[in-house]
């Protein structure tokens, strides 16, 4: 059978399909054209910038961190370069297997693995993180030969911070460490310009001057514009701005004096601050025990951190800045000055000292070594009479004591140029109401609490920095300065030095004749009082005052010898002084924790400080050994010239000259060590232990029964 087709109908269907196909094609071309217009016209500028950014990579160049030097140019903090082996976790498929394989090529210790894991937890964006630092040349060569096996692993050259003198001045200098998450969050609040300056920076100052002068030390970050291929390979450098190194800090500290004082303390706990009263420059800023800041440079390991953090001696506590102590009898000259200035008592007023003072049915005692008899103000200071100052405190009252002594700097921050200072406590009725705000029953000030204040006990708690500042003010007759650690900032690019002058505060309105009474009494302490033996034969005149402050309060009926067996409950040894007497150039405050009488431990250290600064003398080795044990008063043996004694880790100038070593003018090589000569970091486990200084007010000691032993001078 023949089937006839309708040609006209078929042709119509074909044309319809053809038109539909053409419309679809045109529609698709229209979409492409619309997209092309959108991309090439509307989004042209945005996409052009993105394409350019994909082609060009901006790489930050971290600047060299600024140096820290002492007043004589000795380098205390510098930089050196070394190779690090780094892993970018996001580029490594099996991290543990990769680290295990790396350990076959270069040494990777368990502490390196622990540090790497900690860094991963702190850096959620998985940046390039070091698994090993300070690689030797042999290790670099071994890894380079097998680099193809380790995608996501590379060797980088990085700058490391070095503290050439190790533990010397560690609380003062501080240290740097890797920026943690909390610090990154805080940096988000910075100005955009400051944030941009820290791009690429991985380390920041954590403590001391490294933290307080971070902006000066960091420098200005540079950059490189690099053209890259589609695969991310650098093709050529398009632009370059070199980084600007950080500024150099020139300190007022004499690091040789600092090292001497730390050596004299040896294993004992304590603090010493020495200030130039003419300008407020700090000459020594000692806190013992110390720590090695090199431990923190590339991340402290868990064992070392535990040793430092759990040590009963609290080596990380800056006792000069944050440790507060009762001043003991060193407070008495200031009480006498307050009495004269307020008119409560004249210098000629005589008080009968019968070794006990009764008030409100309680009896306050005197040291067993004290002698009874009539005493005027001078003799009361020279002999350190407790009864004289018990009665004076009662006459003045707590608020007048506070108002007269607060201008000296007691109970408030000195505003020194380093962070972390505490204010201490100079009590008043208003202070007690604030301190016991949650305990209304304890807010009332009782008259009996005032008695102990006269001899530097009770709620009195101050830092050595505050006491040294007060001694400086007293020695100059009221001239006041904010203490400073940095005296100059040097711009290493322009070679310009910017002097940082201590801020002069309004002088105290003290009458010269009244100041002379106190200064003369403090001079008497050194020639006929409690520090006579210590300053025998000194080539200068000085004023001073010993102090012995209770570390714990004695209970009723308890005697000092009953608690003497527990070393950490023994009294603290304190000494304050200034010299020369006629025109002081140095004032200091020192404490040796749980060391007993002020003349036994603290005063001998002060004598060596004065001999160093005023006579240019360094103690003999025999004298240092005896002073460390608290077994000497005046210096013994033949003193040495300062330049004859090398700093820790250094050689003396004489030895350097003999061996042909070219030393810097300061006696310390100013060049930064190489990776191979990086400082060796000792284990803190070998460090002997010492006491905890409190940073909150101690409880007022109980009143002593008649005949009980009190606070010794």
Image: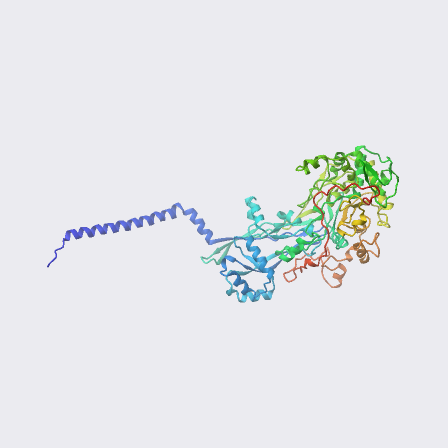
Q: Quadrant of the N terminus?
A: bottom left
> Residue 695's spot in the image, x, y percent?
70, 45
User: Can residue 516 be seen at all in this image of the molecule?
Assistant: no
The image quadrant of residue 405 is top right
From this view, report whether residue 470 is shown above or below residue 87.
above
Residue name at image x 68 percent, y 59 percent = 683
Q: Nearer the viewer, residue 266 or 490?
A: 266
Name of the residue lying farthest toward the top: 343
> Residue 596's spot in the image, x, y percent?
80, 49
> Residue 697's spot in the image, x, y percent?
71, 42
Q: Is residue 692 left or right of residue 90?
A: right
Q: Is residue 116 left or right of residue 3?
A: right
Q: Quadrant of the C terminus?
A: top right
Q: Nearer the viewer, residue 134 or 434?
A: 434
Q: Nearer the viewer, residue 223 or 164?
A: 164
User: Can residue 236 be seen at all in this image of the molecule?
Assistant: yes
The image quadrant of residue 264 is bottom right
> Residue 617's spot in the image, x, y percent?
80, 53
Count of numbered badges drawn on the protein: 0
Q: Nearer the viewer, residue 95 or 537?
A: 95
From this view, report whether residue 288 is shown above or below residue 469.
below
From this view, report whether residue 232 is shown above or below residue 198.
below
Name of the residue lying farthest toward the left: 1
Name of the residue lying farthest toward the right: 373
What colouring method underlies this structural image?
rainbow
């Amino acid at each position: 059978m023949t089937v006839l087709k309708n040609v006209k109908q078929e042709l119509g269907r074909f044309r319809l399909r053809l038109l539909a196909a053409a419309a679809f094609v045109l529609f698709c071309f229209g979409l492409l054209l619309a997209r092309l217009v959108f991309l090439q016209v509307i989004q042209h500028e945005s996409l052009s910038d993105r394409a350019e950014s994909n082609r060009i990579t901006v790489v930050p160049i971290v600047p060299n961190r600024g140096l820290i030097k002492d007043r004589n140019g000795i380098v205390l903090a510098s930089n050196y370069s070394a190779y690090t082996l780094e892993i970018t976790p996001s580029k490594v498929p099996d991290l543990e297997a990769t680290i295990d394989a790396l350990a076959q090529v270069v040494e990777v210790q368990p502490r390196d693995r622990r540090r790497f894991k900690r860094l991963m937890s702190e850096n959620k964006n998985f940046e390039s993180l070091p698994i090993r630092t300070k690689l030797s040349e042999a290790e670099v060569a071994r890894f380079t030969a097998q680099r193809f096996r380790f995608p996501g692993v590379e060797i980088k050259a990085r700058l490391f911070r070095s503290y050439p003198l190790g533990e010397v001045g560690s609380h003062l200098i501080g240290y740097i460490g890797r920026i943690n998450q909390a610090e990154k969050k805080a940096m988000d609040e910075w100005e955009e310009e400051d944030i941009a300056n820290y791009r690429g920076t991985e380390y920041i100052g954590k403590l001391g001057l490294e933290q307080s002068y971070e902006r000066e030390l960091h420098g200005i970050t540079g950059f490189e514009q690099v053209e890259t291929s589609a695969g991310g390979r650098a093709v050529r450098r398009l632009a370059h701005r070199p980084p600007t190194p950080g500024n150099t800090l020139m300190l007022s500290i004499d690091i040789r004096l600092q090292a001497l004082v730390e050596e004299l303390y040896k294993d004992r706990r304590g603090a010493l601050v020495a200030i130039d009263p003419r300008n407020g420059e700090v000459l020594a800023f000692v806190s013992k025990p110390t720590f090695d800041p090199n431990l923190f440079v590339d991340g402290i390991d868990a064992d070392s951190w535990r040793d430092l953090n759990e040590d009963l001696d609290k080596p990380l506590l800056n006792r000069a800045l944050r440790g507060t102590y009762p001043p003991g009898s060193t407070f008495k000259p200031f009480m006498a000055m307050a009495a004269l200035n307020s008119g409560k008592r004249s210098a000629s007023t005589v008080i009968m000292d019968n070794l006990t003072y009764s008030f409100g049915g309680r009896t306050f005692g005197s040291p067993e070594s004290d002698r009874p008899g009539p005493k005027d103000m001078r003799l009361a200071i020279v002999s350190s009479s407790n009864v004289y100052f018990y009665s004076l405190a009662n006459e003045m009252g707590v608020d007048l004591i506070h108002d007269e002594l607060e201008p000296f700097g007691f109970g408030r921050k000195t505003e020194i140029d380093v962070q972390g200072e505490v204010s201490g406590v100079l009590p008043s009725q208003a202070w007690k109401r604030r301190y016991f705000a949650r305990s209304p029953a304890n807010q009332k000030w009782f008259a009996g609490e005032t008695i102990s204040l006269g001899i530097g006990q009770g709620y009195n708690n101050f830092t050595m920095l505050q006491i040294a500042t007060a001694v400086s003010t007293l020695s100059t007759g009221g001239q006041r300065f904010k203490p400073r650690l940095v005296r100059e900032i040097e711009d290493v690019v322009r070679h310009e030095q910017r002097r940082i002058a201590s801020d002069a505060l309004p002088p105290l309105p003290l009458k010269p004749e009244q100041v002379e009474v106190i200064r003369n009494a403090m001079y008497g302490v050194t020639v006929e009082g409690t520090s006579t033996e210590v300053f025998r034969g000194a080539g200068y005149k000085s004023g001073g005052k010993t102090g012995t402050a209770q570390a714990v309060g004695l209970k009723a009926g308890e005697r000092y010898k009953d608690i003497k067996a527990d070393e950490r409950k023994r009294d603290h040894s304190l000494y304050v002084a200034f010299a020369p007497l006629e025109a002081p150039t140095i004032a200091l405050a020192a404490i040796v924790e749980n060391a007993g009488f002020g003349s036994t431990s603290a005063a001998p250290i002060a004598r060596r400080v004065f001999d160093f600064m005023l006579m240019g003398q360094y103690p003999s080795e025999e004298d240092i050994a005896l002073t460390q044990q608290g077994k000497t008063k005046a210096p013994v043996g033949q003193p040495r010239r300062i330049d004859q004694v090398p700093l820790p880790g250094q050689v003396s100038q004489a030895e350097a000259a003999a061996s042909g070593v070219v030393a810097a003018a300061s006696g310390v090589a100013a060049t930064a060590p190489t990776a191979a000569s990086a400082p060796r970091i000792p284990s803190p486990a070998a460090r002997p232990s010492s006491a905890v200084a409190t940073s909150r007010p101690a409880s007022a000691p109980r009143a002593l029964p008649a005949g009980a032993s009190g606070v010794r001078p």
